[in-house]
Image (cartoon, rainbow, N blue to C red):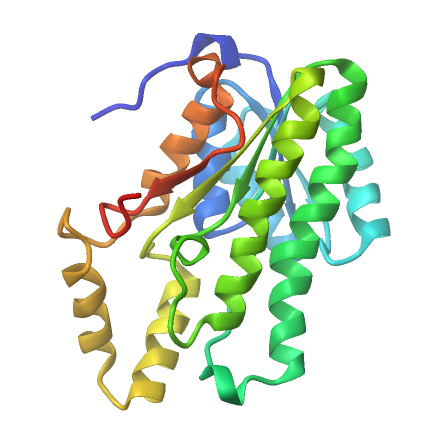
Amino acid sequence: MKPPVFSELQGRRAFVTGGATGIGLAIAKALAAQDVVVAVADINLDAAAQAVQSIGNGAVAVEVDVRKRDSVEAAFVEAVNGIGGCDIVIANAGVSTMQKALELTDEEWDFNFDVNTRGIFLTNQIAGRHLVGQGHGCIVNTASLAAKVGAPLLAHYSASKFAVLGWTQALARELAPAGIRVNAVCPGFVKTGMQSREIEWEARLRNISPQQVFDEYVGQTPLGRIETPEDVADVVVFLCSDSARFMTGQGVNVTGGVYMT
C-alpha cells in the first residue's frame, strides 16, 4: 500500500537528527518522497553522506553531536544554508543501554539523558527559534513506548523518554501562539540496529535466548509482527502535514497496539 500524498509538503525543508540509519533514515526518505528537501544530521558524517545518496531530492548531510550546543547550532546553520531554510524539525537522535536499575552506573544514566533528553532540548530550542522567527513550522520528537510505560532493564532510558514527552507538551503550549506545532511519536518494538543490540542485552540479563526475547516482543504486539521504521515514518509525515494542523502536544503511539492509551 502506497502512503498518502500530502501535496502541501512539496518544497518544504526538513532538519532530521539521527537521520543516517534506522527510524531517522526512514523518516528522511518518507519526507523526500513527499518532495521535502532534507538535511540529514548525524554524529556519523560518512553514514549521513551515504544516506543522502539513497534519499536524493537535493538532500544534504551535516555532522552533529546533539549533546553539544555549539555542534547543534553549527549543524543547523549549515543545514539551513544547504537546503535553503527549514520548515520541519525532526529531533530523532537517540541511544539506549540496558541494565538492571539497581546496577546502573552514572555513566549509563548520563549517556541516555545527554542524547535522548538534552539532545532533543537543544535541537528543539535552536531550531525552534528559527521557526518562531519565520512564523511557521512544526517539530516532531521521537519518544518511545518506554515513554508511556516504564520498561524493565530500561529504567534510565524510560526516564529519559518520559522527559521528552513532558518537554514536548510544555513546548507545544509555549509555541502554539506563534503557530508552531510540537508533537512526538512513540514507537514500539522497531526492527533497527538498536533493537538488535537490545535483544542481545536482554537475553544475557535474563539468561534466555535472543529468539525468546524476539518472540516475546511479537507476542506483546496485538498486530502480530515487529514494527518497521517505515511504520513510524509514515505517521511522522502525517504529523508534518496540514492534515495534522490541529494536533499539538501529542505523544502519538505507533506500537501495533502494545500500548493503547
Q: Is residue 46 visible?
A: yes
Task: Give how far across and how far down residue 141 sits, in percent.
Answer: 55, 41
Task: Give how far across and how far down residue 229 sits, in percent.
Answer: 37, 46
The residue drawn where x is 70% and y is 47% is 121
| Front-lying residue, 244 or 234 | 244
- In this view, 130 is above or below 23: above
| Front-lying residue, 261 or 254 | 261
- In this view, 83 is above or below 186: above
- In this view, 52 is above or below 43: above
The residue drawn where x is 49% and y is 49% is 143
Task: Give how far across and how far down residue 209 sits, in percent.
Answer: 22, 83
Task: Give how far across and how far down residue 184 sits, in percent.
Answer: 50, 39
**Quadrant into which the N terminus falls:** top left
**Quadrant into which the C terminus falls:** top left
The residue drawn where x is 82% and y is 34% is 77
Say whether residue 247 is left or right of residue 210: right
